[in-house]
Image (cartoon, rainbow, N blue to C red):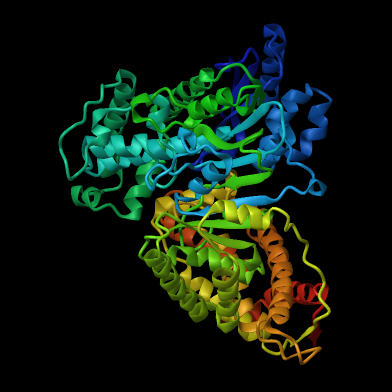
C-alpha cells in the first residue's frame, strides 16, 4: 500500500497555513489514485498547524477511515478542520456561486426600491451603452473591441451614495489550476507534433478555448507574437523565468514523444498528423510525470503572487486558502476607477504584472451621472447556442438592451438571443439601440437588415414568433440612444399578470413533438476531438460547469426543447376561451406559458444532466488507456440518452415523455391555460 503524507505551507499573501496531501481515494486526470489537494487549516500558529498536519498523517495511515461512512468515527478522533479537509473531497464538488458571493458582500437594492435591472448585450459595442449611461466614456476598463472583449461579469449599481464601493470575485483555485494544466498540456503536445517554438509559446501563454491569458500573469516571450504569416519577432524583452518554463515543456515534450514511440509504436507521421489516440496517450503520459506536477505547482505559486499588486482592502478566502473576493471603498470615484483599471488592464506592455485573467466578476456601487439602476454586462459570445450563464443573466434582468452598430452589413449574430427571448416568453424585455451613424441612409439600412433577421426568425420559429419580434423591435423598441432606452424603461418593472385569456391544448401530439426535439438535439450535437471531450467531462465532474470549447450540451438540450415546444405546441393551441381576442393578448398568454415552462425545464435539466449523473461524468473523465476515447464517447451518449433519449429509444424510455408532459402541464395550468388529456 502506498504511503500518503501531508505537509503544511503558507499562502503568498497570507499568514495562515494550509495543508497539502495526496488523497488516497481520489483519482487524478490520468486515472491514478493520489490526487493532490490543498485545504486551509484556519490558523496562523505554527504549533497548531503542526498538530493538525500530524492528525492528517495519522488519518492517512489508517485505511479503515478512508470512507465517507467512517466520517462520524473520525470526528471523535480528529479536529474538525482535518475532517473537512479529508472528507470534503469524497463528496461531489459544488463550485461556489460567485455571483452569490458578490451579493453577500455588496447586495442589490431591494425590489421595492424600484431599481430597474438593465443588461447590455450584443457585440463589443455593448460596453458603449454602459459608458454612455454612466458618463464614463474615457475609462479604459470599459473599453472593448472584438479582440479584447472582457471575460468577466460587470455589475454596476448606480445610486445616491456618498462612497464608492466595489467587490471583485476571482477564479476558483481548481478552475485556475485546470486552465493552467490545459495550457501546459497543449503547449507540450503542439511542440511534440512539430509545432515549433512559436506554437509552444502561443498555447502555453494563451488558453486555446478560454479567455485565460497566462502571459498576463507570468510574463511573455517574443515567440508568442510570431505567426505563420510573419516570422519577425516584435520588440518584447525575454522573460527569463518564462523561458525556463518553456525549456521544461520543450524537453519534456520530446521525452514523452520518444517514450510513446517506443511503448505505443507511434510513428513520426502520427505525430505530424496526430489522431485522438496520440493526443490522449500524450496527455496521460505527460500528466503522470513528476516534472508536470512540479511545473504546475511552481506556476500556481507564481500566479498567486499577483494578488499582492492590489492595494489595501478586505479579503475573503476559500477552503484552499485561495482568494475568493476582495472588497474596497473610497470617497473619490477616480480612485475606484483607477483601481478597477489596474484589475482589468489588457496592456501587453504590462504582461507579468497583471491580475486580469483571474478576475471573474466585478460589482460596483456609487453615484454616476445622477442615474438610478442596476446595469450589467456579461462575457457573452455570439455562438448559435447561448451559454447557460448568458441565459441566466437575461432571465435575471428586467430590460435587455442590444447595442448594435448601424453600419453592420448583417445582424444575424442577434438571432440566437432573439430566438431565446421568444421561446422563453421574454421578448418584451428587448430594446434595440443602434449605435454609430444616425443618418437617414443608415437608418434605412438598419431597417432592411432587421427585416432579414425577422424573416430568419419566421423560418425557424414560425409566424407567431415573427409577429412578436416584429412588434417588439420595429414598433416599440428601436432607438438610437441608450438615454432613450433608459427613460423609456426606468419605471417599467412589471410582474407578469395572470391573463383572463385561456388557450386550450390537447396532448395528442406530445410524443411526436418530443421525437422532433430528440432528433434535432442529436443532429446538432457535434463530435469533438478527444482532448476537448475529456476537458468537457472535467467541467461537469469537477468544476461545476456545463460547457467547454464551444461544446454546450446542456444549453443545447434546453434550447432545442424550448424552441421545439414553442414552435410545435405552445403556439398551436386547439382553441381559446374567447374567440374575439387580439393577437397581442394571444401572444402574451403564450409568452406566460413559455416563461413558466423554460424555468421549470432549466431546473429539471440542471438536476438530471449535472447533479444526478455526477458519478457518470467523473467516470467519463477518468477514462484512460486503450480505447479511452471511444469509451468516453459512449459514456457521454449514455448521459444524454438518460435525459433525452434518441428517437428510436423513446419507446423504451417513456419516463422522458412523462417528465416533459408534467412540466408542460404545470406551465399551461399555472399560466391560466387549459390542457385536455
Depth check: give the residue in front, 419 or 225: 419
280 vs 539, left or right, is: left
Question: Residue shown at 15%/38% (left/top)?
Answer: 231
x, y percent for residue 179: 46, 38
Residue 354 found in image quarter: top left
Question: Residue shown at 65%/82% (left/top)?
Answer: 571
Quarter in which the C terminus is drawn = bottom right
Depth check: give the residue in front, 600 or 22: 600
Q: Residue furthest front?
A: 440
Depth check: give the residue in front, 136 or 529: 136
x, y percent for residue 108: 73, 41
Depth check: give the residue in front, 338 or 286: 338
Question: Residue shown at 61%/70% (left/top)?
Answer: 422
Quarter in which the N terminus is drawn = top right
Question: Residue shown at 74%/28% (left/top)?
Answer: 83
Residue 637 can be seen, yes or no: no
x, y percent for residue 495: 78, 62
Residue 81 found in image quarter: top right
Residue 306 can be seen, yes or no: yes
272 vs 300, left or right, is: left
Q: Residue furthest left?
A: 231
x, y percent for residue 446: 43, 67
Q: In this rendering, is residue 527 above or below 171?
A: below
Residue 183 found in image quarter: top left
Q: In this rendering, is residue 48 above or below 141?
A: above
Q: Tell how many labels.
A: 0
Q: In this rendering, is residue 95 above or below 2?
A: below
Amino acid at each position: 500500500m502506498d504511503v500518503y503524507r501531508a505537509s503544511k505551507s503558507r499562502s503568498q499573501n497570507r499568514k495562515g497555513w494550509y495543508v497539502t496531501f495526496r488523497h488516497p481515494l481520489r483519482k487524478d486526470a490520468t486515472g491514478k489514485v493520489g490526487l493532490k489537494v490543498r485545504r486551509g487549516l484556519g490558523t496562523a500558529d505554527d504549533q497548531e498547524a503542526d498538530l493538525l498536519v500530524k492528525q492528517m498523517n495519522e488519518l492517512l495511515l489508517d485505511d479503515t477511515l478512508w470512507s465517507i461512512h467512517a466520517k462520524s468515527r473520525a470526528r471523535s478522533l480528529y479536529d474538525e478542520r482535518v475532517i473537512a479537509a479529508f472528507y470534503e473531497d469524497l463528496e461531489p464538488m459544488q463550485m461556489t456561486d460567485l455571483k452569490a458571493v458578490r451579493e453577500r458582500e455588496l447586495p442589490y437594492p431591494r425590489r421595492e426600491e424600484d431599481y430597474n435591472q438593465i443588461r447590455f448585450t450584443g457585440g463589443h459595442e455593448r460596453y458603449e451603452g454602459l459608458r454612455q449611461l454612466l458618463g464614463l466614456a474615457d475609462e479604459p476598463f470599459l473599453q472593448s473591441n472584438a479582440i479584447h472583449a472582457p471575460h468577466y461579469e460587470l455589475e454596476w449599481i448606480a445610486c445616491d451614495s456618498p462612497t464608492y464601493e466595489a467587490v471583485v470575485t476571482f477564479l476558483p483555485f481548481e478552475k485556475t489550476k485546470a486552465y493552467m494544466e490545459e495550457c501546459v498540456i497543449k503547449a507540450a503536445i503542439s511542440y511534440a507534433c512539430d509545432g515549433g517554438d512559436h506554437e509552444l509559446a502561443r498555447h502555453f501563454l494563451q488558453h486555446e478555448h478560454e479567455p485565460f491569458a497566462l502571459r498576463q500573469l507570468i510574463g511573455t516571450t517574443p515567440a508568442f507574437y510570431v505567426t505563420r504569416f510573419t516570422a519577425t519577432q516584435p520588440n518584447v524583452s525575454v522573460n527569463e523565468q518564462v523561458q525556463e518554463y518553456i525549456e521544461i515543456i520543450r524537453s519534456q515534450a520530446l521525452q514523452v514523444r520518444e517514450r510513446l514511440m517506443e511503448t505505443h509504436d507511434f510513428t513520426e507521421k502520427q505525430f505530424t498528423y496526430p489522431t485522438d489516440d496520440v493526443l490522449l496517450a500524450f496527455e496521460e503520459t505527460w500528466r503522470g510525470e513528476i516534472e508536470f506536477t512540479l511545473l504546475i505547482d511552481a506556476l500556481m505559486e507564481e500566479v498567486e503572487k499577483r494578488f499582492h499588486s492590489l492595494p489595501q482592502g478586505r479579503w475573503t478566502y476559500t477552503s484552499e486558502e485561495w482568494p475568493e473576493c476582495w472588497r474596497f471603498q473610497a470617497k473619490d470615484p477616480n480612485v475606484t476607477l483607477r483601481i478597477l483599471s489596474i484589475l482589468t488592464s489588457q496592456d501587453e506592455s504590462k504582461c507579468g504584472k497583471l491580475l486580469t485573467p483571474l478576475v471573474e466578476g466585478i460589482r460596483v456601487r456609487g453615484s454616476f451621472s445622477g442615474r438610478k439602476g442596476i446595469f450589467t454586462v456579461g462575457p457573452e459570445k455570439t455562438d448559435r447556442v447561448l451559454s447557460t450563464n448568458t441565459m441566466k443573466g437575461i432571465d435575471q434582468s428586467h430590460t435587455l438592451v442590444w447595442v448594435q452598430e448601424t453600419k453592420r452589413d448583417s445582424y444575424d449574430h442577434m438571432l440566437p438571443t432573439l430566438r431565446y427571448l421568444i421561446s422563453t416568453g421574454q421578448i418584451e424585455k428587448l430594446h434595440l439601440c443602434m449605435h454609430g451613424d444616425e443618418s437617414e441612409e443608415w437608418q434605412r439600412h438598419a431597417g432592411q437588415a432587421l427585416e432579414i433577421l425577422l424573416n430568419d426568425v419566421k423560418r425557424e420559429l414560425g409566424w407567431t414568433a415573427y409577429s412578436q419580434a416584429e412588434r417588439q423591435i420595429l414598433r416599440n423598441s428601436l432607438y438610437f440612444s441608450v438615454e432613450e432606452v433608459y427613460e423609456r424603461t426606468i419605471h417599467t418593472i412589471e410582474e407578469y399578470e395572470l391573463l383572463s385569456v385561456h388557450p386550450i391544448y390537447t396532448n395528442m401530439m406530445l410524443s411526436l413533438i418530443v421525437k422532433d426535439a430528440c432528433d434535432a438535439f442529436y443532429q446538432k450535437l457535434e463530435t469533438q476531438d478527444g482532448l476537448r471531450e475529456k476537458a468537457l467531462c472535467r467541467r461537469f465532474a469537477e468544476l461545476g460547469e456545463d460547457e467547454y470549447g464551444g461544446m454546450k450540451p446542456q444549453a443545447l438540450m434546453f434550447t432545442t426543447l424550448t424552441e421545439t415546444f414553442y414552435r410545435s405546441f405552445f403556439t398551436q393551441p386547439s382553441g381559446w376561451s374567447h374567440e374575439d381576442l387580439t393577437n397581442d393578448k394571444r401572444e402574451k398568454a403564450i409568452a406566460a406559458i413559455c416563461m413558466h415552462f423554460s424555468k421549470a425545464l432549466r431546473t429539471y435539466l440542471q438536476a438530471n444532466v449535472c447533479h444526478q449523473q455526477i458519478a457518470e461524468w467523473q467516470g467519463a473523465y477518468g477514462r484512460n488507456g486503450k480505447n479511452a476515447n471511444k469509451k468516453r464517447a459512449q459514456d457521454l451518449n449514455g448521459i444524454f440518452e438518460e435525459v433525452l433519449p434518441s428517437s428510436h429509444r423513446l419507446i423504451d424510455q417513456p419516463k422522458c415523455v412523462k417528465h416533459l408532459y408534467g412540466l408542460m402541464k404545470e406551465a399551461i395550468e399555472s399560466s391560466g391555460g387549459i390542457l385536455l388529456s
